[in-house]
């Protein structure tokens, strides 16, 4: 009879140490190796992260991280959103390893190798673990979806303004400012 092994954060850390060039997540006791994203999706993720960080840091509202910062969620999954924000009062000092909480805001940017279903499922998982707002950015369709627990999805397109007043009062970004520039 075969025995299933329950993988833990420590298993993930050991495997990551042996293979530092691979990005990994721990989801439902399975290690998932993450492939690099496409160029455009990473450019959009960096842009939204920079816009967010440039608003958050001078106001000392919290911490903004990119796709390599892992979160150990209450259900023991270890995941990394493309961009995340944690309120200052919830994380006074950055941990050396994974943050042991759900971020207040997480953002996923769709790349060519992603499915909308998998990204929406990831956002729902974060929301179920305590994240207050999840945002899905789809550069190909110029569309932004905003998720909050127990609320209808808010859809934004070019001409709209992205804001998260419950977490980031005063922060506003024109949706068109998220996309890769054309030169």
Image: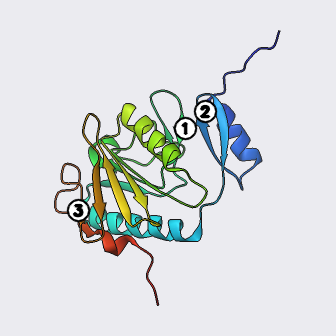
Look at the numbered disc 1 and give the secondary structure of its residue: strand
Q: Which disc, if any, is residue 38?
A: none
Q: Do the residues bearing badges 1 and 3 touch, measured as CB atoms within 8 Å?
A: no
Left or right for 29, reference 124: right
Q: Dot 3 corresponds to which residue?
A: 59
Specify the quadrant of the image occupied by residue 30: top right
Residue 85, horizontal then vertical, whole percent: 36, 52
Q: Position of residue 128 (x, y in %)?
A: 38, 31
Residue 158, compared with residue 133, is above or below; it is below
Q: Is residue 113 left or right of residue 18?
A: left
**Residue marked by disc 1:** 78
For image coordinates 35% across by 39% down, the residue present is 131
Residue hosting label 2: 9
Visible residue check, residue 101 = no
Counting from the top left corner in percent of width and height, residue 136 is at 40, 53
Judging depth in this view, the residue of 50 and 121 nearest the camera is: 121
**Can the viewer see residue 59?**
yes
Q: Residue furthest right?
A: 1
Residue found at the far bottom of this picture = 183
Give me the residue at 60% from left, 33% from top.
Answer: 9
Binning the other alpha carbons within 10 Å of mark 1 as few (below 14), some (14 to 19) or many (20 upward) gives many
Taking 70 as reference, is 168 left or right? Answer: left
- Give how far apart the Cα atoms at labels 1 and 3 are: 29 Å
Residue sitting at the far front: 141
Q: Secondary structure at mark 2?
A: helix
Which numbered disc, 3 or 2, marks the residue that appears first in the sequence? 2
What's the residue at 43%, 82% (across, down)?
181
Q: Circles 1 and 2: CB distance less than 8 Å?
A: yes
Q: Tell me the crowding category of disc 3: few under 14, some 14 to 19, or many 20 or more residues within 10 angstroms, Cα based.
A: few
């Amino acid at each position: 009879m075969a025995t299933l092994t329950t993988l833990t954060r420590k298993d993930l850390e050991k495997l990551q140490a042996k293979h530092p060039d691979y990005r990994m997540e721990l989801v439902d006791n399975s290690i998932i190796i993450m492939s690099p994203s496409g160029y455009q999706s990473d450019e959009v993720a960096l842009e939204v992260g920079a816009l967010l960080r440039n608003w958050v840091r001078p106001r000392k509202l919290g911490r903004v991280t990119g796709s390599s910062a892992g979160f150990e969620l209450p259900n023991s999954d270890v995941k990394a959103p493309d961009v995340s924000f944690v309120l200052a009062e919830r994380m006074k000092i950055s941990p050396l390893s994974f943050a042991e909480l759900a971020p207040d805001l997480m953002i996923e940017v769709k790349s060519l190798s992603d499915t909308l279903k998998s990204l929406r499922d990831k956002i729902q998982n974060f929301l179920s673990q305590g994240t207050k707002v999840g945002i899905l950015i789809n550069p190909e369709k110029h569309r932004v979806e905003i998720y909050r627990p127990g609320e209808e999805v808010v859809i934004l397109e070019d001409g709209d303004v992205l804001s998260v007043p419950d977490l980031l009062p005063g922060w506003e970004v024109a949706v068109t400012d998220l996309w890769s520039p054309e030169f």
